[in-house]
Amino acid sequence: MLKHIKKWNTLRNQLLVVYLFVILLVLIIVSAITYISVEDLLQNNAEEQIRQTAIESSGRYDSLYEQLNMVTKQVITNEEVQHTLFNETRGDTITFDQRQSLMNTVNLIQANADGIYSIEIYTKNYERVIPIDSTSLVDRVNKKWITAANEARGGLIWLGEDPYDENYFLVGRQINLVDRNFLRGGYILARISRSHFQLNPTKQEEGAQGLYGGVR
């Protein structure tokens, strides 16, 4: 046994073991450095992708909010809307023909707004003017949102998911009467399709493929 050990315990074999050990050590170090570099690269790419998505989302939401603000403001300042609600505050009854005419006017404005599914108008006493039915505003949304609209004094507020249809969101605002020193004349609600808030799925998929396409 001792002779067998001495046979292999030569300078050549010792150098071979040292050489193999150094090679193994170098491979471990190179592998560790490569792993860390690839991990950092993937993390940086992921962070950049998230940052770009966040910027795109923010820009889209800002643009959508501004569009909603502009369209609803066009509706509430429309002469026919103002006139109808002004007369209602004086005790005049809104006739069916007036409601039909008002609906046509609002639909014309709404047609130029992407993403708005429908617009509802209510009197200051929460009675629905359009669409034409007997739904009350207090039955449509939680009363805390009416209070929020009053406190906003005509500013656009976010009401969240439509309680009657999860596929839509609601925004609203108080309607102030220009000819009555901006006193409250009613309320407006706008329904926005949930899908309108989603980013382009094709673009997101392409971004994901670009990020992970070379990794297997």
Image: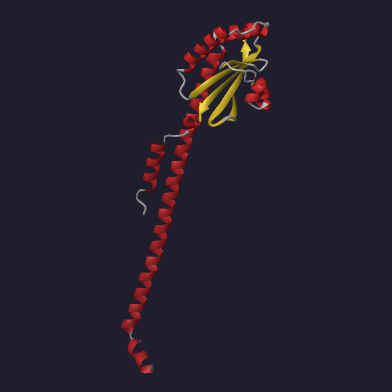
Label total for image: 0
Residue 99 image point, x, y percent: 56, 11
Q: Please tell me which residue lies in front, 97 or 46.
A: 97
Name the residue at 47% across, 30% down: 196
Q: Would residue 155 be visible to someone looking at this image?
A: no
- Horizontally, is 29 left or right of 194 in the view? left
Q: Is residue 19 above or below residue 28?
A: below
Residue lying farthest left? 12
Q: Please tell me which residue lies in front, 215 or 29.
A: 215
Q: Would residue 65 be visible to someone looking at this image?
A: yes
For the C terminus, give its image quadrant.
bottom left
Q: Is residue 96 above or below residue 155?
A: above
Q: Is residue 10 above or below residue 93?
A: below
Residue 31 image point, x, y percent: 39, 62
Name the residue at 35% across, 70% down: 23
For the N terminus, give its image quadrant.
bottom left
Residue 170 image point, x, y percent: 57, 26
Name the residue at 64% across, 21% down: 137
- The picture quadrant where one finds residue 78 is top right
Q: Please tell me which residue lies in front, 11 or 126.
A: 126
How is the model colour-coded? secondary structure
- Horizontally, is 92 left or right of 210 in the view? right
- The picture quadrant where one finds residue 38 is bottom left
Residue 190 image point, x, y percent: 55, 22
